[in-house]
Amino acid sequence: MLRVDLVGHGLTEAVRKARFPVDEPLDESGLAALRGGAPLTGARVRTGPERRARETADALGLSGEPDDRLRDLDAGSWRGSDMGALAQDQLFAWLTDPEFRGHGGESVTDLVARVRFWLAEIASAGHDTVAVTHPAVIRAALLVVLDAPATSFWRIDVPPASITRLHHRGSWTLRMG
């Protein structure tokens, strides 16, 4: 049986202030929450390329390779913007239409396709993996595992520093608790 642990990055100022991230570090409370976290051993480690993912891995004592497929959902021209500062019709479209690319970045369906391919490669390679990544990537992985529609993307809450475990035995399953 193959195991994949998806670790959400720690808390950042952008998360706290409902702002689209750029490439910010973890804040002090984000770092503090990770210290003494659950040990994740016996697996190869991959991280999203962003600073917040790499710092999360470091805080957990994990040394791993950056993997561009674990990068955050690209918010395009919205990077660094407060959500409240956006035109409400654009924000509504982004939250309800998984094909939305009005910000010039990546759509939810683009992200789901990227994560589907990554999971297929992990299953094919057969190595237990710890992936330190972003809530959006974890949501996309859950949609793939549960064969859920992309319209369900925003209905999954992934808290900072959470761990989501997947197993693969011919197909992917979600392991709770």
Image: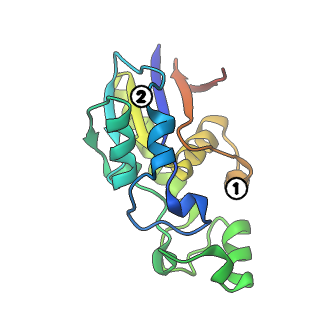
Q: Is residue 71 above or below residue 161?
A: below
Q: Amino acid at mark 1?
A: Trp
Image location (x, y in percent) of residue 134: 49, 49
Image side of residue 122 versus residue 168, left or right: left
Which secondary structure, mark 1?
helix
Q: Is residue 86 above or below residue 116?
A: below
Q: Which residue is mark 2?
A: 123
C-alpha span from label 1 to label 2 = 26 Å
Viewer can see residue 142: yes
Q: Quadrant of residue 132?
A: top left
Q: Amino acid at mark 2?
A: Ala
Nearer-the-camera pick, 22 or 25: 25
Q: Are there few (<14), some (14-19), or many (20+) residues within 10 Å of tag 1?
A: some
Image location (x, y in percent) of residue 13: 51, 60
Q: Are there few (<14), some (14-19), or many (20+) residues within 10 Å of tag 2?
A: many
Q: How many marks?
A: 2
Image side of residue 156 versus residue 44, left or right: right
Q: Is residue 55 above or below residue 63?
A: below
Q: Quadrant of residue 85?
A: bottom right
Nearer-the-camera pick, 77 or 84: 84
